[in-house]
Image (cartoon, grey):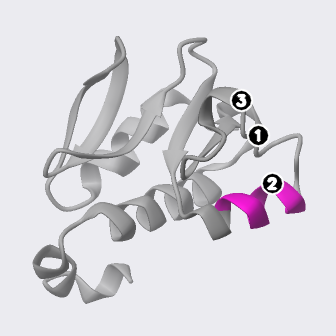
Amino acid sequence: MALFDDVRAIALALPEVVETTSYGTPSFKVRRAMLARLHDDGERLVVRTTMEDQAALHAEDPVRYTVPDHYAGYPFVVVPLAAIDRAELRELLTDAWLLRAPATLRARHPDLG
């Protein structure tokens, strides 16, 4: 089970990630590009992904990895924090960072990808 404090610690350990707000909830961005945000319900995390990964995650476990109507057609998955562990959370956030960080920043951190 992951806690939002785990999200914060993992996200802020990634290069140039800052905590801000999106839609009134805490979010994490790299150079203004959002990686993840706390869902309005305070119990789930909205995480940036690719459309392909979104489909694969949802197909693998549709209870854990949901795509609410609001996010249909957008590259995000919504996952309950209580349903994932720290290792899985780290992987989701690192993958989101790799998608959103500029190439020059990614090149300086080959260990992440």
Residue marked by disc 2: 58
Q: Is residue 5 left or right of residue 34?
A: right
Res 13 → quadrant = bottom left
Q: In the image, 31: left or right of 101?
A: left
Three-letter residue code for mark 3: Asp
Neighbor class of circle 1 (other Cα within 10 Å; few <14, some 14-19, many 20+) is many
Q: Does residue 105 sit above or below 47 in this rendering?
A: below
Residue 45 x, y percent position in the rendering:
56, 33
State how far apart marks 2 and 3 are (Cα). Answer: 13 Å
Q: In this view, does 93 lie to the left or right of 31?
A: right
Q: Residue 66 carries which label?
A: 1
Q: Earlier in the sequence, mark 2 or mark 1?
A: 2
Q: In which quarter of the image is the C terminus?
A: bottom left
Residue depicted at 36% across the width and 37% down the height: 8
How many angstroms separate mark 1 from mark 3 (CA)?
9 Å
Q: Do the CB atoms of the residues marked 1 and 3 lie less than 8 Å apart?
A: no
Residue 40, position in %: x, y?
53, 13
Question: Dot 3 corresponds to which residue?
Answer: 69
**Element on which disc 3 rests:** helix
CA neighbours of label 3 inside 10 A, class few (<14), some (14 to 19), many (20+): few
Decide whether residue 59 is among the magenta residues: yes
* Identity, as a three-letter code, of the amino acid under mark 2: His
Q: Nearer the viewer, residue 75 or 1?
A: 75
